[in-house]
Image (spheres, rainbow, N blue to C red):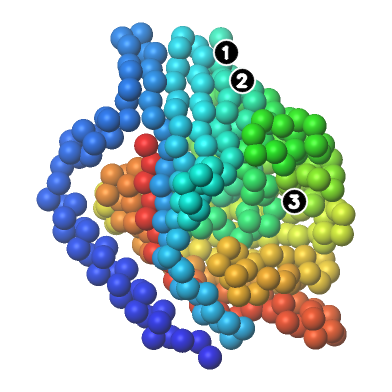
Amino acid sequence: MIKQLSLLRTAVFASLLMTITNEVVASETSSTYDKIWDYAKLYESENGNYLNLSGRLQADLADFEASEGDFEDTLWRRARFGFKGRYGQTTYHLEADFNLHSSIPDTYNRLTDAYLSWKLPNQATLKVLKHSAGFTLDGKTSSKRLLTAQRNNLTNNLWFTGEYFTGVSLSGPINEQWSFNSGVFSSDPSDEVGFSNASYFGLLSLARAFAAGGYWDKGDIRLDYVYNDTHEDQNTRDFSQVVSLNSRLQKQQWGLSTDLAYGNGDMGQQDVWGLVVMPHYQLNDMLQWVVRYTYLDSKGPGGIRLGRYENEIVGGRGDRYNEFYGGVNLFLYGHKAKVQLGAQYTTMENSGDSPDNRSNEYDGWGVTLALRTYW
């Protein structure tokens, strides 16, 4: 039985916290936050060279309850620290991920960013070594700037959630409307820079920006294509090809983000396709409302993973997934410091006659209070 009182308690606590925080922040000025974040600037020259601290700290209070069980926890979602700088046309970034739930000698997890990049004469950017390989709507959006507490489950299933891979990429404008991003990456699962223990995947994205018109003030549509040379030791999903058509549109305070994506399964993975529709409304500089619908379908049973916290309740896979999400974002200092509160209702079905297949089904509610900051 779903423990609705526990979910309600979490939502009430989060609402009170956001209300109190809103009153406090309203009395502050942006200059106060500017002064705090200025401490991350270690060096800056007149000709644009600089050295800054970089990182992010993210925490979740999650309460998920379903017919199949429940999960409740307060945890550090991400903790990263490093440095980013520029000298001339060269940018360098070194950042590591840490597990704050481990004892001090064991807190280090892995390198995330460890790259050099150069701005070329044609305004393209060349980047080498370990960096983010982004595709799909939420896969190419940094966790620092997500509009929901977690990435949508279409991205979670098709995107390569390791995110940071050793490789080379080239991105930049083609003309005033069109731009591109391309790259070849190692699927090596190394926690540092690695080339040898797996294979490779290639990424190509083409984007078209929309000028202001009757239906939008700004927007873009992007086609992402990934070819993945699947390998048993890889740090990628078991899809040989992934295609995503995703878009973002903005009209005054209204916004709409969408994603239609397909993955060609390999190594026992079923083919999967899905759709995400995410309207959002910016009430003012501090408050934003977000609604999201996610649908996933696989060609056969057992092709779809549940989301992060639902997966703690039911670890198996299904073949049809629906999620309805509603949330509010409180921006204390833009995306650099924000509070996100989201509630979602999720179902997953799995075809097949065996009791094991039916046990992978899911029907439940979840509430997440997320604290996000980066520098």
Task: Tell me if mark 3 has few (under 14), some (14-19) or many (20+) residues whose alpha carbon lies within 10 angstroms of its own.
Answer: many
- Inter-mark Cα distance, 3 to 1: 33 Å
Quarter of the rendering occupied by the C terminus: top left
Tag 1's secondary structure? loop
- Inter-mark Cα distance, 1 to 2: 7 Å
Assess whether mark 1 and mark 3 are in contact (beta carbons under 8 angstroms). no
Circle count? 3
Query: Which amino acid type is shown beneath numbered disc 2?
Result: Leu
Query: Which amino acid type is shown beneath numbered disc 1?
Result: Leu
The residue under the point 54% across, 47% down is: 106
The residue under the point 42% across, 33% down is: 54
The residue under the point 39% across, 30% down is: 53
- Which of the two residues, 38 or 302, is positioned nearer the viewer here? 38
Q: Position of residue 81 (x, y in %)?
A: 45, 37
Q: Position of residue 82 (x, y in %)?
A: 46, 32
Residue that mark 2 sits on: 126
Assess whether mark 2 and mark 1 are in contact (beta carbons under 8 angstroms). yes
Residue that mark 3 sits on: 237
Residue that mark 1 sits on: 120
